[in-house]
Amino acid sequence: MARDVVACGPAVNCFDCHRGHGPYAGVAAFLARLAAERPRLAARHEVELAAIAPWLDRTARPPAEEEPIRFHPARRTACLAYGAAEFVAAWAEGLRKPVTVVFEHVAEADETTAELLAVLAPRVAATPLRLELREDGTAEPPPPPSTPEAVRAALGDGLARGFYHHAARVAVHGRALVTPGGDLRQWWACTTGLATALTALERAPEALDLYDQARAATDDPKINMSAAYATAMLHARHLDAAAQDQTLARHWLEEALRLAAGLEDSPHKVISTVFYEQGLALLDARQGAPEQALRLIDDGLARLAAVLAPGEHPQHLARLRHNRAQVHLALRDAERALADLDLVIAHDPGNCEYYVDRAALHRAAGRTQAAIKDYGTAIRLGPHLPEAYYNRAVLHLERGHEQRAREDLERVLAVEPGHLDARITLANLLLERGASEEAERQALAGLALAPKEPALLCTLGLVRSERGEPAEELFTQALEGDPTLVEAWTNRAAVRFERGEVSAAVADLDRAVALSPAPEPRFNRGTALARLGRWEEAVRDFTDALAQPGLDRTLRREIRAELERCRRAR
């Protein structure tokens, strides 16, 4: 129900955003109203709309009932906000007269609501839609959930949907209502839920402390078993790289398995044991024993098949086969990895992660169209995964579809402004198309986030050198950050050559040639050597450049002309 719509005087479109109503309060009801008005438009955004306003999907089970074995990344909300803003913008562009929508209690909004409004406001600025954001409101916020059942339902829903700030608040509230001695089940549900939320929010050390508290509070074997496994995964995956400890991770996995062995025989015991062993397989693969990892996974799949009914828990089987695909890749067996991914997708066709992995295999095998299709599916299901957009853009560039590549790169940056690879690729694409001012804006935007990024410094230097402005220092700074950046050596050499410092240019080009087999550095060095009258060396460089595969036709003609000139002069 859209209970976050309130009456606020003469305003017709007024929505209460107080976080007491939950994630996406206010904006969810607004989106639902637009979806009812424009169902065909809404159908193109069904994934993000159903994630934000789940009542729009009448066939879906409540997320908390799905018992997820993996959780959404925290950045998914940025992807949802992008998709929702595109939906609202498309609706708003069809308006015939101005419409004002009021959002109340924005100062007390959940992080999901605040994020979406921040993305939406600039996106609709040029449309007839006007957003009025009010810090206060006319309605009182509800009281938080107080019964154990309501707390657990709200916590489970927040975790399953990937709304971790909300889940953390619910868990903190729930923990304050009970003690381990008074209601151990409730206390543990809130403790492990809070730890899960904190881990997703990159606050893993706090999660680690919570599991230590659980071990100190109770000797319940099931709780200690779950805490041991979670502690192992924190040490293996989620702590900062410097703080990760694979030895401790293995210790806690073995403790979880020891406690699991004491459970009564049941499918739950088998499932728990198999999944704890997958942690050991992860460590084995990382520590150079993929064959041992493969044996653990194969054994786990066999034991799951023995206790699960046909069609039961397909995500469990999919996760193990996905793990096995990763191990096959480590063993350089792409064919078996692809076969596993095909099975994984058949078992769990709604998981965007699997399509991204399969697309990478298709791409490596030269099946570009299949890769593009899988990236497209991942983008639809994700929705709007920045990495899928970026990888598809690279494929579009390889196929010469520059406009499609640009559109995908711009989508990446709309969702994730700090995606440096996309920023670099877009800036260079714009520069190649002669849009130097746009390329400069992209480079400066990236450098505002990463001031010492070598590739962006190099691109900015190239823009300014083409305008005749000083650029050598930018190339030098780029090389200080990355001495292997061929483009910076080549472009600094060009600046020095044009200034008449030919020997210095040759020295830079020596570094570029040592780093890359590409024809351009050899052609440039040959040109500089010819200027110095070192004809034999110049002939060798031009000859080597001509021998490189895939040489551009225009560059080939230029190299041949210079080669003939050197042969005549020597």
Image (cartoon, rainbow, N blue to C red):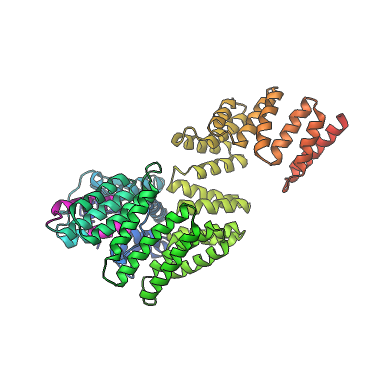
Quadrant containing the N terminus is bottom left
Q: Identify the residue at image location x=76%, y=36%.
A: 541
**Mainly helix, strand or loop, the magenta region?**
helix
Relative horizontal placement of residue 105, taking residue 562 as reference (left or right): left
Farthest right residue? 568
- Closer to us: 209 or 470: 209
Which residue lies at the image location 78% right of the left edge and 32% below the top edge? 538
Residue furthest top in the image = 500
In which quadrant will I find the C terminus? top right
| Quadrant of residue 521 within the rendered picture | top right
Task: Say if 513 sits above or below 262 in the image.
Answer: above
Give x and y (percent) for residue 550.
72, 48
Across and down, in percent, residue 242 comes to 40, 41
Image height check: is 518 above or below 19? above
Residue that lies at the very extreme toward the left in this rendered image: 182
Q: Position of residue 61 (x, y in %)?
A: 31, 68
Q: Quadrant of residue 436?
A: top right
Numbered disc total: 0
> Range of the magenta residues?
153-181
Residue 131: say if magenta: no
Instruction: Residue 168: say if magenta.
Output: yes
> Is residue 384 at least partly visible in the picture?
no
Q: Give the percent coordinates (x, y) of residue 285.
A: 47, 55
Can see residue 256?
yes
The answer to which quarter of the image holds residue 36 is bottom left
Position of 506 with respect to 295 (left or right) is: right
Q: Residue furthest bottom?
A: 310
- Kindly identify the residue that appears in the image at 72 percent across and 45 percent down: 552
